[in-house]
Amino acid sequence: MVIRAGVIGDPVAQSLSPRIYNHWFDAVGMAGRYEAVHCEADRFEETVRRLMAEGWQGLNVTIPHKTRAADLADYRNPEVEQIGAANLLLFRDGKIIADNTDRRGFARSRLNPQYVHYQATQGRARKAVVLGAGGAAGPIVLDLWGLPEIVVTNRTFQKAERLADRFDEHVRSVRWEDRNLEVQGADILVNTTSLGMKGQPPLEVDLSGLNPGALVVDIVYAPLRTQLLQEAEKLGFFTANGLTMLVYQAVPSFKAYTGLRPPSPEKILQILTREL
Ligand code: ATR
């Protein structure tokens, strides 16, 4: 049997996911085809159902469909229920099951070894600031939940409010104009917006108030070293780029499609890092 799967989004042509999955299909010696599926918002449901009828195993979901994907599913895992967004739809016996693997990708990108060491020796992080409240922000807030203070800020303030409302009083929303104030004294800063991506405006945020030993994560991976990460490095903070999250969120998806763990995610991470 040939495994058929893909990533559905708009835009999607730039996605590196086909490279990752097709590399893994080859590596495990499995017949599989993973494609980028371009789909506009108003044709999402119809396209998902068509691919399911054609025998696809499932789809990864990206901009702008993650919320719609969660709504469409017949079953949602508890994380999807909590954050209202899915990045993986699995087709099983004519039913659609929604999962979100972005949290696992982010958790891995947080494991910068120097940062982990710093945390272990110098004390634990207390405050995180999440920039953006789009489809990628929910799983990240979920992963950070447990810190005493998490601040979500977004250009469209209502979206930040709505995301914070899905959690408890440890998560609060602030206006985009106030982001620099909130960065003061934070230990973790995550960019989940598209700012800083090739072709997008730069992200403007003042990092100077972050605590020493802070971690700055950018989910953008094109370019790999965004202005945000360059600035963070210059100021001596620890950093993680978006490619790690991309590769590691794909690991549980590949396993769900094939029943197999992909061999050595580090290898494709190195290959793509060299290319970017
Ligand atoms: P994703 O699924 O990758 O999160 P998205 O849902 O389209 O994509 O979210 C993009 C994020 O980038 C949002 O937080 C968006 O802010 P809005 O909710 O106000 O649209 C943010 N973003 C995009 N362009 C921006 C800009 N010029 N200034 C500030 N934020 C921006």
Image: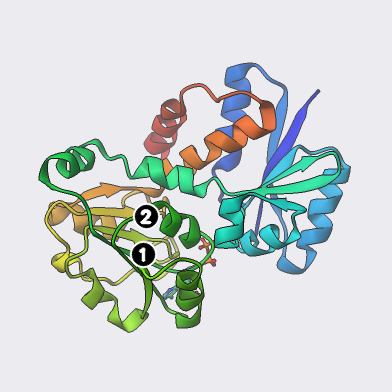
- Up the image or down, 189 lies above or below 98; here it is below
At 51% across and 21% down in the image, what residue appears?
A: 263
State the image coordinates of residue 102 (x, y, percent, origin top left): 50, 48
Indicate the amino acid at tag 2.
Answer: Leu
In this rendering, the label closer to the viewer, 1 or 2 = 2
Image quadrant assignment for residue 260: top right
Q: Is residue 223 left or right of residue 120?
A: right
Indicate yes or no: mark 2 CB to ligand 1 under 8 Å: no
Any mark on residue 90, and which? none
Q: Find residue 171 and report its horizontal and vertical position in percent.
A: 38, 68
Horizontal and vertical percent position of residue 222? 42, 52
Which is nearer the eye, 30 or 213?
213
For the point 17% across and 63% down, the residue is 210
Q: Which mark is residue 130?
A: 1
Q: Element under label 2? A: helix
- Evaluate whether residue 152 shows in this view: no
Residue at image position (68%, 43%) is 6
Local crowd size for mark 1, using a 10 Å CA cut-off: few (<14), some (14–19), many (≥20):
many
Say whether marks 1 and 2 touch (CB < 8 Å).
yes
What separation in Å lies between label 1 and label 2 (alpha carbons)?
10 Å
Question: Can you see residue 32?
Answer: yes
Q: Does the residue labelled 1 lie within 8 Å of ligand 1?
A: no
- Please identify the residue farthest to the right as the structure is shown: 53
Q: Which of marks 1 and 2 is nearer the N terminus?
A: 1
The residue beneath circle 2 is: 144
Q: What residue type is labelled 1?
A: Val
Left/right placement of residue 131 relative to residue 261 reads left
